[in-house]
Amino acid sequence: MNWLAIANYLTLNWLEIAGTVTTILGIWLTTRRLLICWPVVLAADFIYFAVFFRARLFSDSLLQVFFVAFTLYGWWHWWRGVREEGEVRVVPLSLRGWILGLGAGAVGAVLLGWLMVRIGAALPHLDAALTSYSLVASWWQARKHTANWWLWIAVDLIYIGEYLYKDLRATALLYAVLVLLAVLGLRDWRRAPAAA
């Protein structure tokens, strides 16, 4: 094992590694439906904004801005639910909600992809589609819909390939872990009490 190479990697990629660790902690706390997940996720949003901007993944950078808004909304929405019901209760997503969410993701992917081509982003269409559907999953998560985990599993699997292609190895590993956490979240949220 080359300790100098490891030290060099850690020095060059410390911000990405910090984002990875913070994101894993935040998502794990989310799977447990613990309110403390939101400030941890908020820190990860800011860290990954910088990571993605440096990699010229502008859609992903923009996504972090939206994540900040969704994180603040989710924190408030969950806090209100805990105050009223004593815990975070999940809410089923209707067929209409599925159709509207997936349709909004498709429209967002086309519009954002068009913009990203014009500003010279790396992987403009793929990154735009993943960003758009991540926004849908974030909205569903903030609204406490179990369906968010299904969408996160699909999106995160594709993100792994994108990040490997962009040589963001720690982030690709993070997204592999996020797939596993999404599976745990899906399992745990299915067992959780539903809102009345």
Image: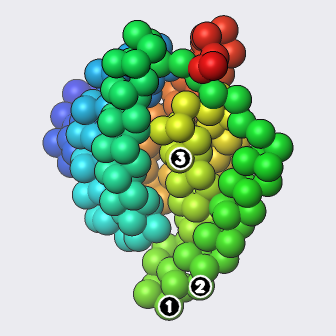
Instruction: Depth check: give the residue in front, 168 or 21.
Output: 21
Q: Which residue is mark 1?
A: 118
Neighbor class of circle 3 (other Cα within 10 Å; few <14, some 14-19, many 20+) is some
Instruction: Depth check: give the residue in front, 40 or 97.
Output: 97
Instruction: Depth check: give the residue in front, 120 or 184.
Output: 184
Q: Which residue is mark 3?
A: 139
Q: Is residue 27 left or right of residue 41?
A: right
Q: Secondary structure at mark 2?
A: helix
Label pair 2/1, CB-CB below 8 angstroms: yes
Q: Which residue is mark 2?
A: 114
Q: Secondary structure at mark 1?
A: helix
Query: Residue 13, how many percent across, how many down?
Result: 25, 45
Q: Residue at coordinates 40% horizontally, 10% vertically from top-left? A: 86
Of the numbered discs 3 and 1, the one sitting upstream in the chain is: 1
- Where the N terminus falls, by quadrant? top left
| Amino acid, disc 1 | Arg
Query: Residue 82, how many percent across, how many down?
Result: 39, 18
Label pair 3/2, CB-CB below 8 angstroms: no
Q: Is residue 120 above or below residue 129?
A: below
Of the numbered discs 3 and 2, the one sitting upstream in the chain is: 2
Q: Is residue 51 above or below residue 31?
A: below
Neighbor class of circle 2 (other Cα within 10 Å; few <14, some 14-19, many 20+) is some
Q: Residue at coordinates 34% horizontally, 34% vertically from top-left? A: 75
Q: Residue at coordinates 46% horizontally, 34% vertically from top-left? A: 174
Neighbor class of circle 1 (other Cα within 10 Å; few <14, some 14-19, many 20+) is few
Quarter-of-image position of residue 110: bottom right
Q: Secondary structure at mark 3?
A: helix
Spatial CA span between label 2 and label 1: 7 Å
Spatial CA span between label 3 and label 2: 23 Å
| Amino acid, disc 3 | Trp
Spatial CA span between label 3 and label 1: 27 Å
Residue 18 visible, this orientation = yes
